[in-house]
Image (cartoon, coloured by chain):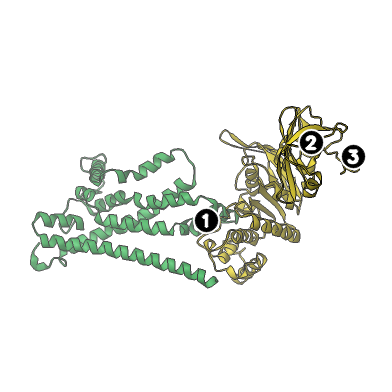
Amino acid sequence: MRPRDGYVFNADTLHAVWLTVLAAAVAVPVNTVFGVAAAWAVAKFEFPGKRLLTSLIELPLSISPIVIGVAYLFVFGMQGLWGEWLMEHGVRLVFSVPAIVIVTTIVTSPLVFREVLPLMQSQGTEEEQAAISLGANGWQTFFRVTLPNLKWALIYGVSLCFARALGEFGSVAVVSGAVRGGTNTMTLQIQLLFDDRVQTGAFAVASILTSLALVTMALKTWVERREAKAFSAAGDGAE
Amino acid sequence: MSITAKNIKKTFGRYTALDGVSLEVPTGKLVALLGPSGSGKTTLLRIIAGLEFADTGSGGIFFDGEDVTQVPAGQRGVGFVFQHYALFRHLTVAENIAFGLKIRRRSERPTKKAIAEKVAELLHLIQLEDLGGRYPVQLSGGQRQRVALARALAIEPKVLLLDEPFGALDAKVRKDLRRWLRRFQDEIGLTTIFVTHDQEEALEIADEVVVMNNARIEQVGAPQEVYDRPTSSFVHRFLGNVNQITLPWGGLIDGSTAHVEDGVAFVRPHDIELVHFSEDRDGEAAVVYDIHAAGPVARVSARREGNNESVEIELPRSQLALLRLVEGDCVLLRARPKHPPVSEYAI
């Protein structure tokens, strides 16, 4: 990196920021839908293999991200299980942007699930049964009763998932190939700059990453405050 | 609307919750399903509501003679009040009550104005006019219970089902609310079934009491009838206090109120007569070892001379005072005759 480009507003850094945010922007909504759906199935229904499913979903939390990256290569890499077949069909799932997005999603996949599940379990199914006895169908019950009840856990799980997606390093390092201005996320960029002994540049990118995390936290706090206020206002109004 | 359950069986794994239960609830009656926990009463209620389904191959549920066994809960026209109210915690009281109307298909949904009017009417009925904007957490237990009732009534059900409606309330609120329910039911005449394990509750407000035990119905009858003439030792034990006196017992006379089963006489404490011991009267001797005289009724505990079995007797405080009974006194006990007119025991 040439210093005269500036440490923040140079093309490589900006691309890394964009790529990181893109990965998070895909991972968060996917994992929110997945997490809520999976937690719903586990909390509200009885079926064989439920424990196995739960452990499977939580697996990415208990293994090192770098192992997830290696496992990903093992399946999709050139020498991997499906690598040859994918190549023949012109799909490139390693050392590419999709690779970064997919592993980020995998690594952060349990986070929303983990936040939402205990709440769903503790709330039981009585409110859903009440909705059904009042004539609600499955979708109405889910969107009008189940989902609104999860609000707090959901806000927390989503911000956690977003923060984790921004900061993911190990798995991305393995699958991205770290091409500057191509497949380099912020965390990888920081490492590259360090390796090049451009410490100031590394700190600059680290600062951007930190700012993003702080903005996420501020946003979460703001939403929580607003909700709490609306709630107590309704109560006072009724006095 | 009348409700009929025919030969309902329900098992959860190896556990039998209902073992061929049949029940007939006439239109407009207030019926109590009474029994200890695990007797199957809640399961029966839930099957009537359509929240649970009977085992395949068992009988069915009929509303006014029409088979609704396979009809899902939402389409049975049933108002269900849950034990822990199950109010929607993210909705206000008014929104909770309106829920069942708001979710209807556009063609069947009342106008916004009509819904608002209905909510106001129900808030008035449950005497919570000013609390429509509150959230459930901001209400007391009794208020939540009434909101749950209003929410169930909003959809104008043909049957009202309540699962332990007063179970989670304190004693005072409980009494007020159940009397309120009785008056309310009298006014609108909706066929109502409620589940309870509290015999006092069932006996006080129900038109008919269904006593359940061990996945079966033990006895069905008017409160007075099941209390006065239990047909099984279970009902005897479950409804009100009862002494279980091993036979032979000198106090058992012909035409008494005692129920005899398997060599044991079941006699209620207030159906035992007590006098000071004397040779020329019949009855069995016992020694008083405890006198408890708080409240309107005095409770006397005595031990039978023969086998030391403990017997409890209840009598009015005034009578206790006349007897001048003290602990250690020797007394005679006998079962009260069914028709207790002139008695040599008159004091």
Does B145 appear above or below B111?
Answer: above
Q: Nearer the viewer, residue B283 or B56?
A: B283
Q: Which residue is mark 3?
A: B344
Cα–Cα span, label 1 and label 2 = 66 Å
Q: Position of residue A180 (x, y in %)?
A: 15, 57
Q: Which residue is mark 1?
A: A141
Chain identifier, colour yellow: B
Chain identifier, colour green: A
Disc 1 crowd rating (10 Å Cα; few below 14, some 14-19, many 20+) is: some
Q: Position of residue A1 (x, y in %)?
A: 10, 61
Q: Can residue B36 be spotted in the picture? A: yes
Q: Nearer the viewer, residue B11 or B328?
A: B328
Give the amino acid type for the residue marked by disc 2 in the picture.
Answer: Val
Disc 3 crowd rating (10 Å Cα; few below 14, some 14-19, many 20+) is: few
Cα–Cα span, label 3 and label 1 = 69 Å
Determine whether, in the image, residue B257 is placed left or right of residue B153.
right
**Mark closest to the chain's N terminus, 3 or 2:** 2
Q: Nearer the viewer, residue A48 or A51?
A: A51
Which chain's residue wears label 1? A
Q: Tag 3's secondary structure? A: loop
Q: Which residue is mark 2?
A: B331
Q: Tag 1's secondary structure? A: helix
Determine the residue located farthest toward the right in the rendered image.
Answer: B342
Give the amino acid type for the residue marked by disc 3 in the picture.
Answer: Glu
Between circles 3 and 1, the one closer to the viewer is 3
Between circles 3 and 2, the one closer to the viewer is 2
Between circles 1 and 2, the one closer to the viewer is 2
Q: Position of residue B64 (x, y in %)?
A: 74, 50
